[in-house]
Image (spheres, rainbow, N blue to C red):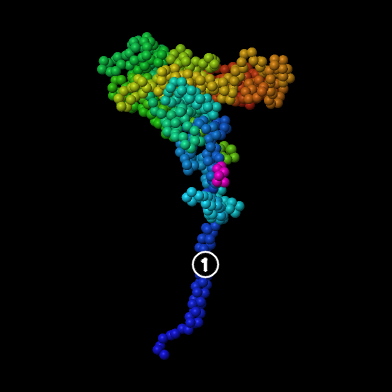
């Protein structure tokens, strides 16, 4: 023997087999015992997957409950994908906005309130199965069928481990009916006056609620291919412009509130142009008006008189008044892209002897339409600047109100008496001044007030005003007392007729006519007056028994419908939606309860009391601040109701 170990072939084979068995046993032990959880997780991951569960985005509704934006399930991918659908297309699209490709808001209110609208996604653990599916592919000039293994989720074996929380529903202050009227009027106006664009906003002056807000041209948020650009801009908040003569109201407010220029003071005639300094550029009017007081200067829109008033008011006080009305600052935190405008400081206004004077008639300052609308709303409501409101309330998926937005007073800017004096001037502007085209023959009993404005655009290249390019505007109060609506209309670069009284003014009139004649948007008190002459239903059913009203209607050929329960007719309304001419509400008139009238205008209060048929006496003007009898007290026939009205202050 030479000392070497020799293994027999059979023994070597046995050793090799035993070694392999040992390795396999160890691997089995490692998988099933030592690393059991690791391999269980790997195996589970091969057949399961974790997916986000879509959270329904909150709907967007107008103040009447009409849905503007909703969700639509994408049926091509079962229950995974949704898309946003805007049910009324272009209507209020610049206000509502749209989403990006990831389902997040990228403009308008969809962007501003994206978090509240989005909700919180859930989590679902799904079990995946494999299926073999056939696909057709091109192979040169021929088509061949290819089989592929595709992993699909087995929904019956999936489960949600975290529920999705839907977003909140947003209810706007916007009235869809008014919005539609405004958008049509703007489109017609742009076409008629060959303008670049036109914008309008309607504000409820006592609350600051925005009832309509639009610019034209606009865009369709449902379109996947339409470019938007300027069409997506809500120019009511993004456009900065020189207001021109509409700013004269602010100058008048500064003069009256500070008791510097009384409304009866007469300014001497300067002719068509005023030259107070041979070295300064003249300030001119369109005509020679003669001697004028402040009211007449407002009626004729005299630049000369308001330049003189601004000079007497002084830079400090005029600046403070403009600042008090909200110029030079955003009106709200919730308007995407809102401009601040530009308000010169007092020392900037006095660097020369002309700038302060020109600010008196709306030059040397830039504003936004929403700033001007809210300023006029303060004049309409008695002197209080309100914050503009676009969102009225938030509701959950069960339609319960979870947050109600209350009107917000910013500050008192002017006294009630100053506001009343300015409103009387605005009434004269419409009825005998530069805004005569605003007077409506269709609604002659609604007395408008307002102010026209025409401002030449400032050319940054030449550093001069361009006489060929203007911004025409009109801001109106409807009606001028107990105002329901403050409406601003702006026309950018109209051709031919370019002054505000001939362009923006007529658009304002059409908007108001559309609202007052609309069966749903019109104030109810005005609807009652819309029964045409020679109409078979033109009669008073109030106080009649149901049988007597039915007989009278039959004799006159008037179709009536009855609503409610009771013996006598307590109210009547024109039937705009059904076949009847008049809807008669039945009730008990002998022992009605006194309604709460506090905060209502005289017109609204009288309308309600007219349904009860009691005598009403009132004193003052504005809104109801006190009443007798008190709310909920029983009323008998012959009772006299006494109301005290006062302008808000």
Camera-side residue: 348 or 637? 348
State the residue at coordinates (41%, 18%).
496
Residue found farthest to the top: 290
Q: What residue is shown with label 1?
A: 31
Q: Is residue 364 above or below residue 100?
A: above
The answer to whether residue 74 is magenta is: yes
State the residue at coordinates (37%, 14%).
286
Which residues are drawn in magenta? Answer: 73-79
| Number of marks present in the image shown | 1
Residue found farthest to the front: 141
Camera-side residue: 235 or 584? 235
Q: Position of residue 582 (x, y in %)?
A: 66, 20
Camera-side residue: 316 or 310? 310
For the question of whether residue 382 can be seen, the reply is no
The answer to whether residue 301 is magenta is: no
Q: Position of residue 9 (x, y in %)?
A: 48, 82
Q: Position of residue 493 (x, y in %)?
A: 40, 23
Q: Quadrant of residue 469?
A: top left
Left or right position of 301 against 79: left
For the question of whether residue 514 can be seen, the reply is yes
Assess disc 1: are there few (<14), some (14-19) or many (≥20) residues with their C-alpha within 10 Å of its C-alpha.
some
Residue at disc 1, secondary structure: helix
Q: Quadrant of the N terminus?
A: bottom left
Residue found farthest to the bottom: 1
Q: Position of residue 206 (x, y in %)?
A: 50, 26
State the residue at coordinates (55%, 21%).
516
State the residue at coordinates (66%, 23%).
579
């Amino acid at each position: 023997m030479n000392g070497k170990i020799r293994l027999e072939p059979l023994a070597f084979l046995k050793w090799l087999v035993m070694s392999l068995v040992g390795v396999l046993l160890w691997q089995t032990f490692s998988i099933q015992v030592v690393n059991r959880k690791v391999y269980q997780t790997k195996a589970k991951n091969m057949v399961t997957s974790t997916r986000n569960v879509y959270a329904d985005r909150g709907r967007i509704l107008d103040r009447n409950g009409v849905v503007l934006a909703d969700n639509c399930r994408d049926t091509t991918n079962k229950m995974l994908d949704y898309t946003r659908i805007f049910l009324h297309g272009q209507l209020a699209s610049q206000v509502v906005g749209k989403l990006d490709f990831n389902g997040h808001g990228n403009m308008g209110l969809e962007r501003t309130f994206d978090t509240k609208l989005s909700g919180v996604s859930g989590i679902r653990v799904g079990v995946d199965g494999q299926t073999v599916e056939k696909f057709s592919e091109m192979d040169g000039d021929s088509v061949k069928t290819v089989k592929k293994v595709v992993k699909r989720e087995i929904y019956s074996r999936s489960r949600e481990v975290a529920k999705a929380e839907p977003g909140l529903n947003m209810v706007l202050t916007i009235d869809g009916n008014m919005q539609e009227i405004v958008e049509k009027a703007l489109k017609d106006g742009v076409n008629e006056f060959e303008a670049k664009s036109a914008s309008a906003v309607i504000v409820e002056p006592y609350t600051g609620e925005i009832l309509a807000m639009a610019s034209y041209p606009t865009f369709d948020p449902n379109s996947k291919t339409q470019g938007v650009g300027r069409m997506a801009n809500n120019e009511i908040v993004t456009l900065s412009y020189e207001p021109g003569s509409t700013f004269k109201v602010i100058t008048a407010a500064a003069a009256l509130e500070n008791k510097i220029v009384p409304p009866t003071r007469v300014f001497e005639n300067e002719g068509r142009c005023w030259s107070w300094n041979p070295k300064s550029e003249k300030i001119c009017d369109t005509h020679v008006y003669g001697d004028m007081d402040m009211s007449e200067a407002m009626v004729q829109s005299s630049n000369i008189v308001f330049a003189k008033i601004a000079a007497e008011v002084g830079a400090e006080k005029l600046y403070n008044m403009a600042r008090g009305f909200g110029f030079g600052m955003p009106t709200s935190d919730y308007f995407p892209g809102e401009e601040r405008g530009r308000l010169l400081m007092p020392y900037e206004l006095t660097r020369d002897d002309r700038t302060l004077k020109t600010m008196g008639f709306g030059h040397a300052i830039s504003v936004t339409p929403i700033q001007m609308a809210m300023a006029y709303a303060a004049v309409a409501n008695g002197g209080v600047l309100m914050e503009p409101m676009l969102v009225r309330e938030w509701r959950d998926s069960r339609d319960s109100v979870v947050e109600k937005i209350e009107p917000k007073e910013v500050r008192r800017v002017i006294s009630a008496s100053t506001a009343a004096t300015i409103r009387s001037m605005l009434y004269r502007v419409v009825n005998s001044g530069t805004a005569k085209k605003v007077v409506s023959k269709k609604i002659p009993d609604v007395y408008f007030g307002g102010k026209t404005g025409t401002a030449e655009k400032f050319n940054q290249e030449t550093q001069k005003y361009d006489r060929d390019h203007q911004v025409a505007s009109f801001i109106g109060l409807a009606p001028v007392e107990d105002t329901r609506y403050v409406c601003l209309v702006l026309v950018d670069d109209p051709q031919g007729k370019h002054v505000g009284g001939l362009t923006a003014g007529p658009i304002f009139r059409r908007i108001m006519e559309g609202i007052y004649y609309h069966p749903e948007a019109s104030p109810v008190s005005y609807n009652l007056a819309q029964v045409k002459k020679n109409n078979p239903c033109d009669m008073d059913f109030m106080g009649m028994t149901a049988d007597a009203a039915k007989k009278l209607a039959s004799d006159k050929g008037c179709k009536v419908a009855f609503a409610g329960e009771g013996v006598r007719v307590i109210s009547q309304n024109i039937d705009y939606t059904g076949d009847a001419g008049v809807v008669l509400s039945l009730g008990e008139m002998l022992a009605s309860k006194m309604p709460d009238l506090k905060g209502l205008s005289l017109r609204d209060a009288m309308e309600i009391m007219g349904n009860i048929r009691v005598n009403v006496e009132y004193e003052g003007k504005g809104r109801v601040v006190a009443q007798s009898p008190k709310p909920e007290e029983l009323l008998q026939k012959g009772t006299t109701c006494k109301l005290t009205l006062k302008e808000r202050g």
